[in-house]
Amino acid sequence: MSDQALRLIVAAVLRDLLTQADQDTRADVRTTWMVGDRKGAALAGRPAGHAQLKKGATYAKVTDPAAFEAWVLFNRPDEVEQVSTTRVRPAYQAALLAAAKKAGAAVTADGEEIPGVTVTTGEPTVAVSVAEDAAELLAEAWQSGELWELLGGLLPALEPAKGDDQ
């Protein structure tokens, strides 16, 4: 087997293990931290970056085009245009969706319900920022053995099997 093939295989396995570890850790953060929490971490005794749990994004979209179009046709007929069929003008639709997103509900600025529009808020997201010298810190932690302790918990599939003499 060539060295390049082996490197590609090892990289693929490590990528999959790290991806799973990242997904598991993010899921754990979402269930144990409060939105807005921001926590720093250190490697080799120096700041390596921070992680933060941010609130989920809010989305507004037309989920029932017929109901939405009928409502706009009744309330703002000047915002309906004839294409090959009638439709709500895209700019007006975007403005209504932006207002609904801002309000957090499918309502106009004055509180009237907009049929056919749904507003949802996504799951909180985990943001990670690494220090500029994080790669250097990682190398130092690797050389000192500090990284092995972290990897044991992060990638349990790579922990050596314990023999009878251990």
Image (cartoon, rainbow, N blue to C red):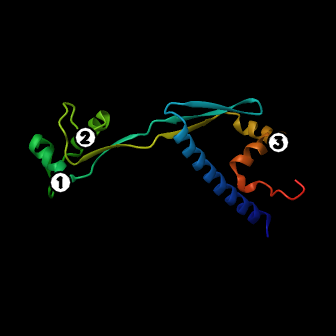
- Calculate the distance from the C-alpha at mark 1 to the C-alpha at mark 2: 15 Å
Structural crowding at the residue carrying mark 1, measured as other residues with C-alpha within 10 Å and reported as few (<14), some (14–19) or many (≥20): few
Q: Residue at x 14, y 44 (%)?
A: 72
Residue 153 location in percent, x, y?
Answer: 71, 47
The secondary structure type at the circle numbered 2 is loop
Q: Residue at x 80, y 38 (%)?
A: 140
Residue 97 location in percent, x, y?
Answer: 27, 41
Q: Nearer the viewer, residue 159 or 68?
A: 159
Q: Earlier in the sequence, mark 1 or mark 2?
A: 1
Q: Which residue is mark 2?
A: 106
In the rendered image, the vertical position of residue 153 relative to residue 36, given as above or below:
below
Q: Which residue is mark 1?
A: 66
Please tell me in which quadrant of the rendered image residue 149 appears. top right
Q: Earlier in the sequence, mark 3 or mark 2?
A: 2
Furthest residue toward front? 164
Q: Is residue 72 left or right of residue 25?
A: left
Q: Which residue is mark 3?
A: 145
In the rendered image, the vertical position of residue 13 relative to residue 63, given as above or below:
below
Q: Is residue 23 left or right of residue 114?
A: right
Residue 108's mark? none
